[in-house]
Amino acid sequence: MKRLSIDKLRNLVLISHGGAGKTSLAEAVLFNAGTIDRLGRADDGTATMDFDPEEVKRQVSINTGVAPALWKDHKINILDTPGYFDFVGEVKAALRVADSAAVLVDAVAAVEVGTELVWNYAEEFSIPRCIVINKMERENASFDKTLEALKSSFGAGVVPVHIPIGSEASFSGVVDLMEMKAYEGSEEEPVAMPDIDVSAYREALVEAAAEHDDELIMKYLEGEELTGEEIWQGLRKGVMERKVFPVLCVSAAKNTGVQSLMDFICKVMPSPSDWGTVKGTDTSGEEEVERKPAENEPFSALVFKTTADPYVGKLTLFRVFSGILKSDSQVYNANKKRNERVGQLFLIKGKQQEPIDEARAGDIVSVAKLQETTTGDTLCDEGKPIVFKPVDFPKPIYSVAVEPKAKGDEEKIGS
């Protein structure tokens, strides 16, 4: 995969109430980026992110799926989380390593219990977010009603940047209020602007962009027109400060409006380098240690997920916060205070693994067959150790134990 600088990376987590269409949106993004060559469907069990037999059978996400999408000289690492409350640990793990979130909302059901829950989780992790109104093609889908519900639940910072062309079965595209251009279907090139009055939406967007920048607000109040670049700049600042929550609309199933959403993610949502230094402690837990999100810093990474793959065995997924880790090398586990032998590194694409030579600051990668490492551990340079705060999983409310029937069966169960 093409090597990109850290400011071109976007680690985006998809979160929502169950059934809002996160996996379908991930599929459309991957298809548009050319990561996959056909558009799968979660309902048919052909989606890239839902590959576990239980996910295929039940047609819901159980695990967080990870896959990269290359788009216009950017790389979007998508973390597609489950929507059902039973799997909230997966959501929290993904939020811990993401730089931004897209909160999906069903255009028919609007704000649901799970929408408010995941919103609060994102707030816990101080994650900037945009809102994506999905399923615009459905009967009874309403952009305006959903927008009102979002403003009522999440405040005045909720501002549309796209508005729909048509509704329900006639939903055919979006008007981009930043560029004042219209896009139909999955086309990249703009089409003629429809006969829709968007002036009030546009004014609200410009005001939201200006509000969080002293220079821009002065210019705005003096009645001067803001340039397109200034609107982008102001909006980006408002998003980073979690004061502006841009609203976009799509039909993931029809792949309508998704390319405009991908453009928006690349232009507005933060990269790993926007966060500045990342904090942890030394191995004693007493002294604070910092790492800049840069390749020339000592290597550091947090393990956020461990899975069992039928072909490569135990697979450890981690987010690199600083430095570079090469395949066939050694790394230090700061929690276990043990060295680990690193074999082949992989990029994850759903159930597939693509071998890579090295993992760089900001990226999300995996490695097979680490002996000591478990979820929540920090991997780092032995000479410059750091321990990151692990994923704060919810406490279990129900426990079970498995015991062997015969004494000689312990080893079989263990392996």
Image: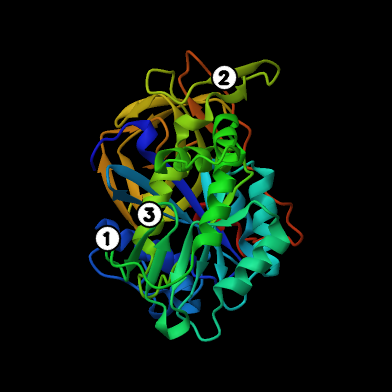
Disc marking residue 262: 3
Disc nearer the start of the sequence (2/3): 3
Disc nearer the start of the sequence (3/1): 1
Q: Nearer the viewer, residue 226 or 115?
A: 226
Relative vertical location of residue 334 with respect to residue 179 in this rendering, above or below: above
Q: Quadrant of the N terminus?
A: top left
Residue type indicated by callout 3: Met
Q: Nearer the viewer, residue 267 or 401?
A: 267
Disc marking residue 290: 2
Q: Which residue is mark 1?
A: 188
The reply to whether residue 151 is in sight is yes
Q: What is the secondary structure assignment of the residue under circle 2?
A: strand
Residue type indicated by callout 2: Glu
Query: Can you tell which of label 3 and label 1 is closer to the viewer?
Result: 1
In this rendering, would 239 be left or right of 37? right
Q: Residue at x 68, y 68 (%)?
A: 149
Q: Residue at x 58, y 37 (%)?
A: 222
Q: Nearer the viewer, residue 225 or 167?
A: 225
In this rendering, would 31 be left or right of 292? left
Q: What is the secondary structure assignment of the residue under circle 1?
A: loop
